[in-house]
Image: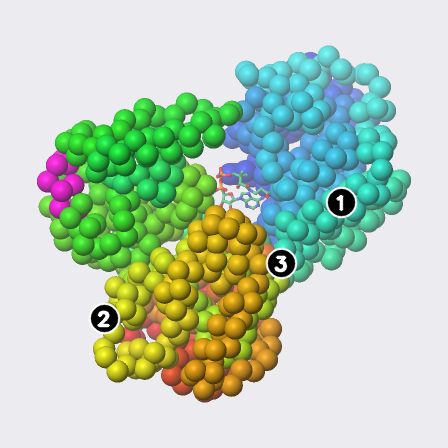
Amino acid sequence: MARYVRIPGSIALITLANPPVNALSAAVRRGITETLSRAIADPEVKAVVLCGENGNFCGGADIKEFAGPMSGPGLVPMIDAIEAGEKPVVAAIEGVALGGGLELALGCHYRIAHCKARVGLPEVTLGLLPAAGGTQRLPRLIGLSAALDLITTGRHVSAQEALQLGIVDRLTEGDTLGVAVEFAQSIAGQPLGSRRLSTRTPACPADLDSFLQGALVQVRRRARGAMAPEACVRAVGAAATLPYSQGMQREQELMASLFRSAQARALQYCFFSQRLVGRWSTPSGARWDSAEPRPIRRAAVIGLGTMGRGIAVSLLQAGIAVVAVETDEQQLEAGRRAVTALLERRAQGRGSEGPLRFTTDLQQLRQVELVIEAVFEDLAVKKQVFRQLSAVCPADTLLCTNTSGLDVEQLAACTRSPELVVGTHFFGPAHVMKLLEVVYGPRSSPVAVATAMHLGKRLGKVSVAVGNCPGFVGNRMLKPYLEQAHFLLEEGAAPEQVDQALEEFGFAMGVFRVADLSGLDVGWRVRKEAGLTGPGVAPGESPRRRQGRRYSPLPDLLCEQGRLGQKTGRGWYLYEGPGAREARPDPWTHSFLQQYRQQHGLQPRAVPQQEVLERCLYALINEGFRVLEDGIATGPEDIDIIYVFGYGWPRHRGGPMFHAGAVGLATVLDRLEHYHHAHPDIPNLQPSALLRRLVASGNPPIQKWREVIRRVRSQL
Ligand SMILES: CCCCCCCC/C=C\C=C\CC(=O)SCCNC(=O)CCNC(=O)[C@H](O)C(C)(C)COP(=O)(O)OP(=O)(O)OC[C@H]1O[C@@H](n2cnc3c(N)ncnc32)[C@H](O)[C@@H]1OP(=O)(O)O
């Protein structure tokens, strides 16, 4: 909808009214078209002001409409009509002007923004391009280079930057609408020719061809198989090389190639899933809309290793006071130096941080409302810390453990108030990575979950509430994926071949590069504790079998050779030296694998790329279905958001569960059956009951999986 009023001073005021963000639904487009005609036809009206209600100008096209047939007036003719009109139209921008919202404002003759407003063309993040003239008007307003940056990254720009770039004409700290109305009165009757952006010539770099070529190379490197960034470069290129009308035609053609693409569907699914996971619930009935989070003003971080330092920085940047605790003065000093350096590096342009105190004295925790324990990943050590915390902290302090997979309930059992214990699984570096798994144990109270979820949001994270099991959601699913990668090496593949297949799929780094980066000793320690390698293994057990199933000792053997990854200068790959980052295929690894296969009588074979992808990804996806069956994740969206934000799953493929649906569940089932038949000693390849049930239910769309999941769970 759009409301129309004529206000004193011969100004027509058109207000977009479609809460919460005034998205340009068919009804809003109709409303704008009709009210604009009214303003143009009314001889009393000298100028028009366009604004949005509830403090937001416009969040862009209504993304929900993209899934169905589009109806109602088109955005392009509507914006063209505003620009071509003989009466000046002033956009009064509060809140956001994004996507079609900014394109609408670019069709207006002037733009006045509130100093807290944000503008941008984020279509690329939805697998699209700004196809209501954005790729043609913005370069004509701010030049090709700046427009290309905004359009290919989709980043939001502050009002101050928008003013500097020339996107908006004026900023106000006060009443945006009042300023816009006054401004409209002041320019009524002035010629509009130069204010029509479509008539301008864009400012272009001197060597246009090589500039555009360079931009294509850059987005291809950054986007790893995503189509939209490349289409954006081509559309912006058309603004530089073609007259406006032909540029618009090119924009429409490129949009048509993206609009119904699988990538656009995947990215739009991610957009809505990211919001859906905020509406969490737990099997015990706790819910986002009934559990009240506690306010957190003071927190403590126990342990200032890499994770603890990042967590402390995250809390401080959210304005929370932090007490940082280490066991001795030496560790404390190292932690203090590291945290200070991180804060200094991130300080430019940031707001003020909360106060920070360092101590070795746990008694200093009497005032804090929340503690995040981030000590060494060892259950016995963590239990000891939780006993101490429970003794010194007030009984109502929320106690969180930063663990990547240990049993949260065992830690809760060490405290006086087990209902106030939750897991907060941060991803490293904790002040950078966007994901937070909030792990509720069987006794975690609704308020504890709500507080941790709310804290995540305050820290700028995407928080996902998950149940308690070894590895939670993310690391539990990672295990079968890693296992398959190791089995593929045994069968004849090389690490770089497996990595290449995964990187071509869209992962920023393949599994072996990631292992080298994180350090191979991390998994080695976990396997030792689980009795899979080291002294805990029963004498006489075959090296390639553990607990009745196939096992690959390859990563253990590498660790035994001191090859721990980048930190030792060698792992699956070879590096220039310890700490170096550029991975080179290592002849040592190849001959080591050859010897290993000979020693175990394994006949190497050429492993096709398709098999690499299917075995690694479908094993991971299969575990995802089990996670859903077990109620550890509430819906497929939780898993997908965890993988997109925490594990480098390519966003344009929507996450593992979305990918399964896109490939076709029947195909995934069929391939898993095939591989399980070929490898009956790998239980992870046995298709899950839920996958079978979904296929039997006719491969419903992912939005309908929850119903099937509920039925399967109730029968288990
Ligand atoms: C064959 C070829 C045919 C071609 C025809 C097509 C022609 C199309 C022409 C032009 C196309 C233009 C494309 C666009 O404009 S795409 C949209 C671009 N806009 C965006 O990407 C902005 C998306 N929104 C946001 O970034 C945020 O929501 C923000 C506006 C910053 C507000 O953030 P916040 O305050 O944190 O609130 P939420 O994110 O939780 O959002 C609140 C609810 O509003 C829903 N929402 C937000 N934006 C939209 C939107 N554009 N469309 C629909 N719904 C939107 C959001 O989902 C939340 O609701 P819920 O929690 O129920 O999911």
**2 or 3: tag closer to the N-terminus:** 3
Residue occupying the point 30% across, 70% down: 533
Indicate the quadrant where residue 78 lies. Answer: top right
Which residue in the protein does label 1 denote? 214
Crowding at mark 2 (Cα within 10 Å: few <14, some 14-19, many 20+): few
* Secondary structure category for the residue under label 3: helix
Depth order, front residue of 383/285: 383
Which residue in the protein does label 2 denote? 536
Badge 3 amino acid: Gln
Q: What whole-number distance in Å separates the C-alpha atoms at marks 1 and 2? A: 55 Å
Badge 2 amino acid: Gly
Horizontal and vertical percent position of residue 447: 24, 44
Which residue in the protein does label 3 denote? 263
Indicate the quadrant where residue 158 lies. Answer: top right
Q: Is residue 523 visible?
A: yes
Ligand 1: which quarter? top right
Crowding at mark 3 (Cα within 10 Å: few <14, some 14-19, many 20+): many
Residue occupying the point 15% across, 48% down: 384
Residue occupying the point 47% across, 83% down: 598
